[in-house]
């Protein structure tokens, strides 16, 4: 009985982790943090990879 509950808890923790990581990375790159947080929850590490490969939308003012 506990193994099903435990695996569900791990799944929820992983989803929350990916939502958080995607949100933070997107915010740092000037992307829509809420959108990428949702994508992180749905697609996990694939969303992180896409964020890392996307160019930053922040303008450099040098």
Image (cartoon, helix red, strand yellow):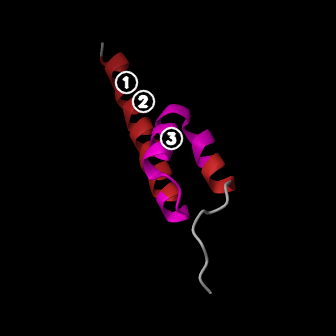
**Residue under label 2:** 11
Q: In the rendered structure, are the residues bearing label 2 and label 3 in contact, judged by CB atoms less than 8 Å apart?
A: no
Q: Is residue 62 left or right of residue 30?
A: right
Considering every residue shown, the one lying at the far bottom of the view is 62
Q: Residue at x 55, y 62 (%)?
A: 29
Q: Could you tell me residue 57's position as x and y percent?
A: 60, 62
**Residue under label 1:** 8
Q: Is residue 59 above or below residue 4?
A: below
Which one is earlier in the sequence, the residue at label 2 or at label 3?
Answer: 2
Give the quarter of the figure containing the C terminus.
Answer: bottom right
In this picture, which residue range is highlighted in magenta?
Answer: 27-48
Q: Is residue 41 above or below residue 50?
A: above
Q: Could you tell me residue 59's position as x and y percent?
A: 60, 72
Mark number displayed over residue 40? 3
Q: Residue at x 46, y 52 (%)?
A: 33
Does the magenta portion include 39? yes
Nearer to us of marks 2 and 3 is 3
Nearer to us of marks 3 and 1 is 3
């Amino acid at each position: 009985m506990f193994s099903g509950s435990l695996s569900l808890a791990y799944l929820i923790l992983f989803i929350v982790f990916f939502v958080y990581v995607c949100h933070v990375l997107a915010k740092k790159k000037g992307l829509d943090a809420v959108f990428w947080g949702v994508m992180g929850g749905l697609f996990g590490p694939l969303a992180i990879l896409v964020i890392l490969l996307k160019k930053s939308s922040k303008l450099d003012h040098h």
